[in-house]
Amino acid sequence: MDTIRTSPKLRHYEGLYGDISHKLDAEYVFLEAIETRSKGFDWVIYPHIHSHLYQLFFIESGSVKFIGISQETSIEAPCILFVPPSSLHGLHYSTDVNGQILTLSDYVVEMLFPQSSAVMMVLEKLQLISFPEEKSINFDEVMNLIRTASHELFSDHAEKKLMLEAVLKRLLLIIYRIGKNNDANFSKQNKSLDYYARFQKMLKNENQTRRIPSLAKDIGITPAHLNRICRKVSGKSTLTIVHEVLIQKAQNYLAHTSYSVSEIAYLLKFEYQNHFARVFKKITGVAPLEYRRSRR
């Protein structure tokens, strides 16, 4: 395979690779064969990031080259490439590659492990997981879980969501058990991506909303510098990113609680309810009550 050069313009996708304007549901789970998307891009996936998606690449056969910040690494099958949100990754596949790509929203992963900081700490690392013969967990066991997940995703069985959650939880716990002793520096981030990832993590972990200058100070940079990084990485301002995280929390409240719109606006520290409603509609395309009706 020929060498790929990292594009000087950072590619950022809210959805899957190549989906320019596609917005995904907070509880997004998707599984597809590697060739389904990659063949259309001539087997070359240029380095890019997803702010809110975990991706697991299950390489069964063929050859793959991973492209990171300043390195290219040949990957030998069978293996798993585990890519958390805001991690730069590019891939160059051989035409005979065989495998699956599982994509999960960060909301789904955080919902599966709400009380386990130990698991989430490992799942924040970009990892290449190989399967030598001496490993207690073999690759076939993992692929059996993927086949079960595929069966549940594309079926209409009773309580399919519960079954799918159980399968995904077991799969991610396997990644955790292997990954906690794995090399955390498979691919080093550059400073901008590191700041951006820390900003995203702080927004997710904050129980109460904080102003942008306070967040920037904790990261160790100025608000202006943080805004430049957000625009460089995602094409969005810091305020827009903060609003998107708040609206994701609002969607959860609307779908799973009986809080009124005004109560949710108050909880998320919006000064006025109509301001909250405008931001909600701008980001989701629907009014808060319309969203609640659609989910119920």
Image (spheres, helix red, strand yellow):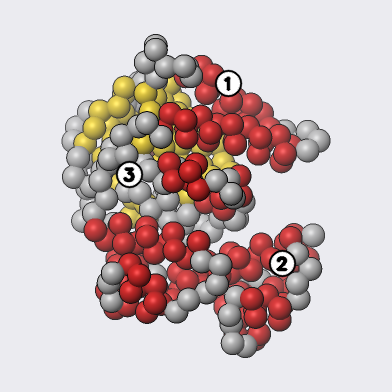
The residue beneath circle 2 is 254
Q: Is 57 left, or right, of 149 in this rendering? A: left
The residue beneath circle 1 is 144
Mark 3 residue type: His
Residue lying at 64% horizontally and 76% vertically, measured from the top left: 267
Image location of residue 165, percent across then percent down: 65, 39
**Rounded to the nearest whole Å, what is the CA distance between mark 3 and mark 1?**
26 Å
Residue lying at 81% horizontally and 35% vertically, measured from the top left: 158
Mark 2 residue type: Leu
Mark 3 or mark 2: which comes first in sequence? 3
Mark 1 or mark 2: which comes first in sequence? 1
* Mark carried by residue 89: 3
Image location of residue 64, percent across then percent down: 31, 28
Screen quadrant of the N terminus: top left
In the image, residue 296 above or below residue 284:
above
In the image, residue 123 above or below residue 208:
above
**Rounded to the nearest whole Å, what is the CA distance between mark 1 and mark 2?**
36 Å
User: Which element is circle 2 on?
Assistant: helix
Q: Residues within 10 Å of mark 2 (few under 14, many from 20)?
A: many
**Rounded to the nearest whole Å, what is the CA distance between mark 3 and mark 2?**
34 Å
Mark 1 residue type: Asn
